[in-house]
């Protein structure tokens, strides 16, 4: 596992973004782990988060894209933090773009924030996490309605590795449905590998009990 991935896992724990216990998801599933990207709230946290995303995006898609699109609302700070980090780390200016929930009819009109999209733009979408692919169902037509863009891929922070609408995980379902790759900075398999019976910030977060709960969860909901 790359060093920055191990650091990112520790960073999620440090920021209280990744938790272990018992949580009820929107889907109704009882999960032994939960990720809440809304817990990144300080300048230093967003700066580091942008760097992790920038490294993962560079590893997955190189420099061959023009725009980083972050769907409202959580995608707005993700996209801005990441393009700043990308410029600093890889010396390339990537434009950021996000959508509004409602189109603005005065001043800077339209549905987009940041850069406007133009024909031929190569776009990478950035999100926190996806379990069902619903956000991409909303985002894809927005992008295609603005210009003739090429979507190079999607980057999320964590691949939960559980079934989406079918037997595959949501990221694989997105690839099958829309034809572009969907990647994550880390997978839950890598999280378990990094944290199982190993101290993180002075605590063992995945002990034998939590590991057994995670294994049982994937026995029931794991993607194939």
Image (cartoon, rainbow, N blue to C red):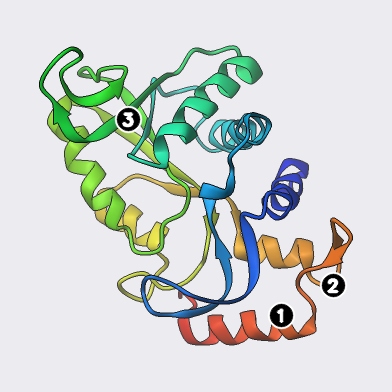
**Tag shown at residue 165:** none
Is disc 1 placed on a helix, strand or loop? helix
Q: In the displayed structure, would residue 65 be above or below residue 61?
A: above
Label 2 or label 3, whichever comes before in sequence order: 3
User: Which residue does the image show at 61% across and 54% down from the upper left?
Assistant: 17
In the rendering, at what x and y percent does residue 104 appear? 15, 25
- The answer to which of 103 and 123 lies nearer the viewer is 103
Residue 157 visible to an observer of this rendering: no
In the rendering, at what x and y percent does residue 224 appear? 46, 75
Q: Nearer the viewer, mark 1 or mark 3?
A: 3
User: Which residue does the image show at 71% across and 80% down from the upper left?
Assistant: 211
Q: Nearer the viewer, mark 2 or mark 3?
A: 3
**Tag shown at residue 211:** 1
Distance between mark 2 and mark 3 Cα atoms: 40 Å
Crowdedness near tag 2: few (<14), some (14–19) or many (≥20) residues, C-alpha within 10 Å: some
- The answer to which of 209 and 102 lies nearer the viewer is 102
Residue 54 visible to an observer of this rendering: yes
In contact (CB < 8 Å): disc 1 and disc 2: yes
Q: Quadrant of residue 54?
A: top right
In the rendering, at what x and y percent does residue 60 appear? 53, 38
Is disc 2 placed on a helix, strand or loop? loop
In the rendering, at what x and y percent does residue 31 appear? 53, 77
Distance between mark 1 and mark 2 Cα atoms: 9 Å
User: Which residue does the image show at 56% across and 66% down from the upper left?
Assistant: 34
- Left or right of 196 on screen, residue 164: left
Residue underneath mark 2: 197
Label 1 or label 3, whichever comes before in sequence order: 3
Residue underneath mark 3: 98
User: Which residue does the image show at 73% across and 41% down from the upper left?
Assistant: 4
């Amino acid at each position: 596992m790359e060093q920055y991935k191990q650091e990112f896992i520790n960073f999620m724990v440090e920021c209280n973004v990744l938790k272990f216990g018992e949580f009820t998801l929107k889907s109704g599933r009882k999960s032994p782990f939960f990720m809440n990207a809304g817990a990144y709230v300080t300048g230093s946290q967003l700066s580091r988060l942008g760097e992790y995303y920038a490294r993962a995006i560079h590893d997955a898609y190189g420099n061959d894209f023009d725009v980083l699109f972050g769907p409202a609302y959580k995608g707005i700070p993700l996209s801005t933090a990441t393009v700043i980090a990308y410029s600093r780390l890889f010396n390339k200016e990537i434009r950021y773009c996000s959508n509004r929930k409602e189109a603005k009819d005065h001043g800077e009109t339209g549905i987009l924030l940041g850069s406007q999209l133009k024909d031929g733009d190569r776009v990478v979408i950035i999100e926190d996490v996806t379990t069902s692919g619903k956000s991409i169902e909303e985002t894809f037509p927005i992008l295609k309605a603005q210009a003739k863009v090429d979507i190079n891929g999607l980057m999320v922070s964590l691949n939960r590795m559980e079934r989406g609408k079918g037997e595959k995980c949501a990221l694989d379902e997105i690839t099958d449905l829309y034809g572009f790759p969907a990647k994550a900075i880390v997978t839950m398999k890598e999280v378990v590998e990094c944290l199982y019976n190993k101290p993180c910030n002075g605590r063992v977060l995945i002990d034998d009990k939590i590991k057994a709960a995670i294994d049982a969860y994937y026995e029931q909901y794991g993607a194939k």
